[in-house]
Amino acid sequence: MKERTVILEETFRKLVEEKKFSSLRDLMATMYPADVAAILSDLPLDMLPALFRLLPKDLAADTFVEMDGDIKEALIKSFSDNELKNVLDELYMDDTVDLIEEMPAGLVRRLMQQADADTRKRINEILKYPEDSAGSVMTTEFVSLRPEMTASDAIALIRATGVDKETINTCYVTDEKYHLLGTVTIRQLILAKPDQLCETLMSPNVITVTTKDDQETAVQTMSKYDFSSLPVVDAEGRLVGIITVDDAMDIMEEEATEDIAKMAAITPSDKPYLKTGVFEIWKNRIPWLLLLMVSATFTGIVITRFEDALALFPMLIAYIPMMMDTGGNSGSQASVTVIRALSLGEVEFTDIFRVVWKEFRVAILCGVTLTAANFVKLMLLDRLTAPVALTVCVTMLCTIVIAKMVGCTLPMLAKKAGLDPAVMASPFITTIVDVLSLLIYFQFASMILHIG
Amino acid sequence: MKERTVILEETFRKLVEEKKFSSLRDLMATMYPADVAAILSDLPLDMLPALFRLLPKDLAADTFVEMDGDIKEALIKSFSDNELKNVLDELYMDDTVDLIEEMPAGLVRRLMQQADADTRKRINEILKYPEDSAGSVMTTEFVSLRPEMTASDAIALIRATGVDKETINTCYVTDEKYHLLGTVTIRQLILAKPDQLCETLMSPNVITVTTKDDQETAVQTMSKYDFSSLPVVDAEGRLVGIITVDDAMDIMEEEATEDIAKMAAITPSDKPYLKTGVFEIWKNRIPWLLLLMVSATFTGIVITRFEDALALFPMLIAYIPMMMDTGGNSGSQASVTVIRALSLGEVEFTDIFRVVWKEFRVAILCGVTLTAANFVKLMLLDRLTAPVALTVCVTMLCTIVIAKMVGCTLPMLAKKAGLDPAVMASPFITTIVDVLSLLIYFQFASMILHIG
């Protein structure tokens, strides 16, 4: 794979240097849009418009869609009104809407002016749907059939209108009021007898999402039922669009990236890392770091309260970081596992007691193993007295159990409260567990060592 | 969505209770395999075989595929040889291979006996590919065309053989030695004139993966080029299978889940959380906890070395957890961002200097912000003396910079060394940063406060 792109890029650059534009045009016409976009994006911005004009009309639009926001912006600024109109005409509705959402206000006005009245109306409708809703990512170019059509009627209709549809692999059978009656795949149409009616061919048990459903729900539905496109209906049950599988894959990747970012206490961004500015990265990270730093001051308060005890048994200090780390790691394991299970729909809030019971048993197993290993080390290597070793070990066992309990319940409670469970990952769990483990530590220290 | 499943399940259970098997058969025939599988899986295991026998042949196979491993195993054990053969005949090759990989050895022997000789040969070939390779997840049921066929020949061929193919949406044009020449979509065939040759219709610039490529590479390629199936070729460049988009979505989800588990120091498992036993969860978590606990003992060694200094300035102890947490969080942010960028292919090892330079500037910004906030708090709220506050603040600034540097470089170095970058996330970064931050702390304490 890698080599292929490198070879194409080298050839391309050579042709650009030698200004062999006619060969460049031929070369680009054989390439995939994603490859053309990648190579053009690496060239100096001022060469872009000239090279882009070499592309045949449909490839130009497909290549345009594959480019990053900053490059799209530069290209649009270089387009004449006519060129802009040509690109816009070739775009599918979902890509047009993405573009409008991505561009600064000044350019949006120009884009809207170049779109025809009907497209403008449809764009405005889609723009009304909430961000990350199924409505906001759907496309409106689908094949719609009627129940009384025969298979050969349907194929004739597809032949006549299919060029402008984003997919023909699944077609949608509706009544005259656009209520969805069933789906017919192109495979069913081709394998059917020519005079068979769509009504008898279609799968009548249609699974849909509404425009307001979350895009993640839509993608999970597609993945569960192995659909290559998913119908989107409005509040009145009328078919208004479909989500195609290529977009579903992008959404799936985007949602996983967002979850991972949140788990590491970062505000998610949809820009690629190397294209994100230093100031923007800082802005996505600093509020969380500040919040966590402030929360962590509670640990300081706890330690200060027990300063005198620590002065009597200074060796207790040495085990604080190890204890906090082990607690934090134990808690993170539980929280991250539960967060992922929630986001894949494997676990629901109603499973909370099953989850807690499972994590409790895992915590006991993990706690006993770690504590045993630690006790041996404390007695043999560190040569602590039995009471001090006991204090450390009992604290560790309790910390691990509490950490796993906090780790598995917080994401579920967050979900129940309508918050994003992904935020309840390592950083927050660690901060909470730190305070708890210190309190337990000093409690046992005062009980076993009679201090405090 | 939710309601739909609940309604179906209630109706279903009622019919089961009333033993209305003929209505159950009709109901199931209208349902999607994923729904039938979900409902059957929730019923007592001993009722399963009887209900499963009610399913029409093709739905039975599709439903079987959607079930979890333990239920599949129970079903196979209840099947007669003939029933088993019927299910196996309906399965696509990729699902058959998945099944064989999932089942215990005793059942595998029975499964292989029921497969016909040709299938058995193909299964054995696919089983030879390494785990998680493109070859191991491909299916061998694709439509293959010849360049000299016309569009109507091609459609006729699809009509004759399409039922047994996993997808007909993209067809593959090969020469007589199975070398891939190009791809034709069903859309191109339908929109084409009937006498147009496949040779002129096909896109000749075919992107393939080899059987030994990683499944993640395959999925990224599909996502990049918006393919709905991807051809897989052997070492001699012959087309041996395809990966379909529904499997690609599963792989994408699986890979994200694996990465997330590794980032939380858990050995990934492919079982759903609620189906994983307590002992197995323990086994996936304990080695990492032990390893991290042992690594964390270095923090104890550092603290013990500076015990006398801490006795002189006991207030220094109170800031250790806050410092370590802030360092750990800063480092995790950098490492998790880089790990995700690496796994999406946005960043390569060659970008290491760009990444380090970007993270360095972000670290300075974050460090200055946090340190400033902290300094104000230390002076005004905690009423520390200026030298002690300075010690804490300078340590914090250095810790954040070092944490971000360690966080962004370790995953890239791991990737370069052929290790999984995802392992270099929060837990390991935190452990390393803890030790470093303590060393810096005591270094500055001895310089500024003249102790140690």
Image (tube, coloured by chain):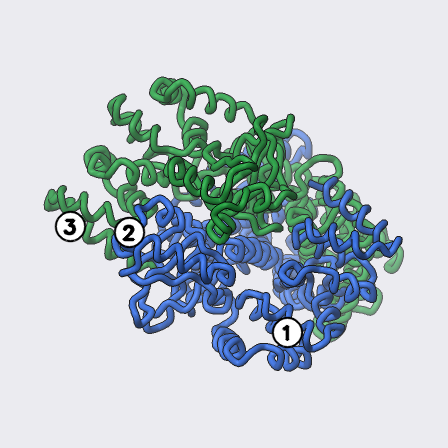
Chain colours: A blue, B green
Which residue matches tag 3?
B14
- Tell me the kind of residue under disc 1: Lys
Depth order, front residue of B427/B155:
B155
* Residue A364 place in picture, x, y as percent: 46, 40
Q: Secondary structure at mark 3?
A: helix
Task: Tell me which residue sits at (38%, 47%) in the image.
Answer: A190
* Chain of the residue displaying label 2: A
Q: Secondary structure at mark 1?
A: helix
Q: Secondary structure at mark 2?
A: loop
* Chain of the residue displaying label 1: A
* Chain of the residue displaying label 3: B
Which residue matches tag 2?
A195
Judge whether residue A95 can be spotted in this image: yes
Task: Give the Cα distance between marks 3 and 2.
Answer: 39 Å
Which residue matches tag 1?
A85
Depth order, front residue of A440/B337:
B337
Q: Are marks 2 and 1 in contact (CB under 8 Å)?
A: no
* Residue A36 place in picture, x, y as percent: 71, 54
- Please state if B451 lies on the left or on the right of B114 as rendered: right
Q: Residues within 10 Å of mark 2 (few under 14, many from 20)?
A: few
Q: Residues within 10 Å of mark 1 (few under 14, many from 20)?
A: some
Q: Are marks 3 and 2 on the same chain?
A: no
- Tell me the kind of residue under disc 3: Lys
The answer to whether B203 is drawn above or below residue A54 in the figure is above
